């Protein structure tokens, strides 16, 4: 059955214990860093949403544990704010940073870089759409993260969850192009449970998820684009029976976005 196959691929558990899952994520990150001793930092872009808040908090806890266990003060967690101009939910970003308490924060506004890239395409006669510009924003943010990573011997940590990976709701080689992803196996509601366990401000995990990449549709929520709610997607990933029409939407999205989850094709 396709549903079971997808659940196995995404590694989603039907039931989790938040406290145990938090430590599992931390141990996963710690193990990788200890196996790669040249790496000394974890880097996460902070958007003000649930997934980046959770991932960043897990990274900060990981680094704190590593410093304590190894007595190595070089380990560091770096948070990046990368708005496109003025971000409408900037206060959520600041609230997230206050909750996470990163070791270091960099603020890089990506707007001029994206516009310059678009202008260079226009000079060659290529006029990009608003949707493509949205992908440019995501890829510019990832480019920034890898530049910081290179300068600080770091790992770029992904914030994507299982519901997003199932539906392909990420930018190829943008937010989908990271080094390691500790919350890949969690669906949206499970991520909320972890944030509750960590005493996150409620508004950070209860807000409507939105990528907010398209200029023509500011603050458009993910679910209106997907055509199905995360609650239904989460139930699907937990092996529950859902409405057949909604199941078809989910599975169509899965097949349509297979290319996003594959490595480059070779002979």
Image (spheres, grey):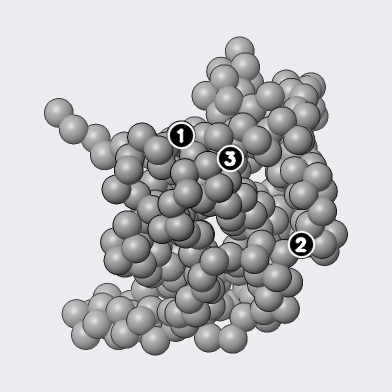
Label ID, residue 31: 1
Q: Quadrant of residue 128?
A: bottom left
Which of the two discs, 2 and 1, labels the residue nearer the N terminus? 1
Q: Are marks 2 and 1 in contact (CB under 8 Å)?
A: no
Which of the two discs, 1 and 3, labels the residue nearer the N terminus? 3
Which residue is pictured at 59% across the width and 86% down the height?
A: 86
- Front in this rendered view, residue 36 or 133: 36
According to the image, label 3 marks what residue? 26
Residue 162 position, x and y percent, is: 60, 38
Which residue is pictured at 76% across the width and 35% down the height?
A: 18
Q: Label 2 neighbourhood size at 10 Å, few (<14), some (14-19), many (20+)?
A: many
Residue 29 position, x and y percent, is: 50, 40
Q: Quadrant of the N terminus?
A: top right
* Badge 2 element: helix
CA distance separating discs 2 and 1: 28 Å
Which residue is pictured at 41% across the width and 42% down the height?
A: 33
CA distance separating discs 1 and 3: 9 Å
Mark toward the viewer: 2 or 3: 3
In this rendering, position of residue 213 left or right of residue 129: right
* Badge 1 element: helix
Q: Quadrant of residue 237?
A: top right
Which residue is pictured at 50% across the width and 79% down the height?
A: 107
Residue 35 position, x and y percent, is: 36, 35
In this rendering, position of residue 42 left or right of residue 24: left
CA distance separating discs 2 and 3: 21 Å
Q: Quadrant of the C terminus?
A: top left
Q: Is residue 265 above or below residue 104?
A: above
Q: Is residue 2 above or below residue 16?
A: above
According to the image, label 2 marks what residue? 204
């Amino acid at each position: 059955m396709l549903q079971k196959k997808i659940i196995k691929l995404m590694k989603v558990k039907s039931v989790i214990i938040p406290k145990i899952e938090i430590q599992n994520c931390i141990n996963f990150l710690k193990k990788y860093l200890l196996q790669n001793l040249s790496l000394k930092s974890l880097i996460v872009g902070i958007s003000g949403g649930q997934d980046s808040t959770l991932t960043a908090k897990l990274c900060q806890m990981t680094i704190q544990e590593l410093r304590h266990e190894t007595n190595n003060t070089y380990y560091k967690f770096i948070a990046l704010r990368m708005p496109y101009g003025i971000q409408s939910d900037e206060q959520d970003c600041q609230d997230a940073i206050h909750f996470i308490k990163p070791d270091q924060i960099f603020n890089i506004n990506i707007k001029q870089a994206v516009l310059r890239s678009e202008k260079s395409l226009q000079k060659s006669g290529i006029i990009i759409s608003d949707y493509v510009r949205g992908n440019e924003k995501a890829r510019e943010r990832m480019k920034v993260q890898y530049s910081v990573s290179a300068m600080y011997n770091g790992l770029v940590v992904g914030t994507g969850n299982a519901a997003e990976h199932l539906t392909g709701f990420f930018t190829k080689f943008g937010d989908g192009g990271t080094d390691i992803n500790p919350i890949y196996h969690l669906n949206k509601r499970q991520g909320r449970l972890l944030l509750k366990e960590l005493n996150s401000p409620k508004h950070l995990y209860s807000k409507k998820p939105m990528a907010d990449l398209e200029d023509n549709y500011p603050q458009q929520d993910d679910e209106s684009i997907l055509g199905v709610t995360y609650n239904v997607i989460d139930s699907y990933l937990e092996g529950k029976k859902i409405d057949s029409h909604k199941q078809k939407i989910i599975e169509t999205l899965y097949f349509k976005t297979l290319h996003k989850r594959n490595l480059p094709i070779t002979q």
